[in-house]
Amino acid sequence: MQRRRFVLGAALVTALVAAGCAANSTAGASTDTLRYAAVGAPAAASNDPHGGLGNESDAMRFALLYDVLTVPGTDGGTQPRLATSWTPDTSLTRWQVALRPDATFTDGRPVRAADVLFSLRRMQEKAAENYGRMAMFDLGSSAVVDDHTLALVTHKPFAEVGRALESATFVVPEGSIDFSNPVAGSGPFRMTGGDAANAVLERNDHWWGPRPPLRRIEIRAIADPQARANAVAAGQADVAGSVHPATTRQSEQDGLQVVHRPAVTVYPVVMRLDRAPFDDPRVREAIKLAVDRKQLVDTVFLGQGTVGNDLLTPADPTSPMLPQRQRDLGRARQLLTAAGHPDGLDLTLRTTTAYPGMDTTATLLADQLKTVGIRIQVRVEPQDTFWTQVYSQADFYVSYLGGIPFLDVARVALLSNSPTNETAWHRPDWDLGFDAALATLDEAGRNARLRGLQQQVRDEGGYLVWGVGDGLDLARPQVAGLPTGPGFQRLFIDQVRVNAT
């Protein structure tokens, strides 16, 4: 693993220019402006809030420009935002969603139920881009009741509608078709300058919510984790999202603060069940038994994490408590021999550097698996193309999960019709079990069913989850109020402040 110290002077300037930093940024924090260096490839930046959200920088900008219906709470529950309540009928297929009556777009128009339904339908139309965010809803049968009430219909009984509406449900005015530039939003900020990769946002003083402490937020898409950290160290940014653990050690010595988002970073290794040799469960189990999980956590996360047990969302309240899978090299060799590979295997493991430690994960796994005769060639793919040409397509690669809840993971990657079923997990019985869980109104009963489903994926599926690490953001000492929750919660930075020194 390459651990670079901060590079100042000409080398830093080169890195920042390459990353697309705004030319008007200057050293030193302002109490009314926040400069955020976010994860994102500038070439992939977008103004469409209903697309794939491949850049975290885009998603964060959209969370400031547009209202969403609900948001994840700090306790794991769902909190109201634009929607004030969501009430089901006895079948759990028809929900009445009440909207705030005082929300307006920045052009002065009121936010209506028609705008919300239009936005949800547009998300569903773009399902191929956004991983089927609205797949559970029958939006053709859904209807506007009045200006501030929506009748929302689900295809099947679905007890978690409130949580489903957390999924980046950015609301735009009805009839919006041109997204070459941002359209009017009803969020806490409005875009006044820059572009999708280097955005300048000003406070929306007509927003219905609590007044943001900051007048201005600048969001820059910077692909390289070290360049993001360097921007803060040089006074070119106030916050750097998702930096490397090695960087944080030096940063704290330099007087910067490290913000921990506990147990949100997972780099699962994907093995596709429909391609040899991973179509043999013995090969998958052998790989899971051959890895040294503690060494991976100590090396990739520098100990700032916990050993994984092949559960995709270990921090989710529905995650089961199971005996820890232990390393067993002898059993791994036996399984490989029984699967017809007594001389081992030759494999290519793909990875990238979009998030700190993804490449290190692959390199260390290759070294560990040599002990059971699995010879791995590591291929580091470009950040700009990894998520479009490797993710959900390659048969063996290092993936990423950023703390989203199990229901989102199931929707995106585990159902037979999931848009990015990256391990080719096609189990009709599992699909039926998932439907049964979501049709259970009682929360305890629903969670018990969900725990069983997660255990089945853990025992039979194609994910190696070796560990879970803290998300680490770097900030100047004056910055306060950065969100520390999992998943989409980290996008909502409207209440962050910059204190005077």
Image (cartoon, rainbow, N blue to C red):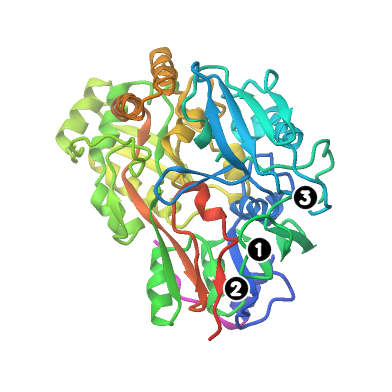
Is 281 left or right of 43, judged from the image as shown? left
- Please state the extent of the stretch shown in magenta in the rendering: 1-9
Which disc, if any, is residue 105? 3
Tag 1 or tag 3, which sits nearer the N-term?
Answer: 3
Find disc 2 in the rendering and name its residue: 237
- Residue at 80 percent of width and 36 percent of height: 174
Q: Residues within 10 Å of mark 1 (few under 14, many from 20)?
A: many
Tag 3 or tag 2, which sits nearer the N-term?
Answer: 3
As displayed, is residue 177 above or below residue 446? Answer: below
Give how far apart the Cα atoms at labels 2 and 1 are: 9 Å
Q: Which residue lies furthest to the bottom in this view?
A: 501
Is 412 left or right of 445, judged from the image as shown? right
Q: Which of marks 2 and 3 is in front?
A: 3
* Quadrant showing the N terminus: bottom left
Marks 2/1 in contact by CB < 8 Å: the verdict is yes
Find disc 1 in the rendering and name its residue: 220
Marks 3/1 in contact by CB < 8 Å: the verdict is no
Q: Residues within 10 Å of mark 2 (few under 14, many from 20)?
A: many
Is 10 left or right of 241, judged from the image as shown? right
**273, 25: nearer the viewer:** 25
Look at the image and say whether residue 396 sits in the magenta stretch: no
Amino acid type of disc 2?
Ala
Whole-percent x, y for residue 321 in the image: 23, 37
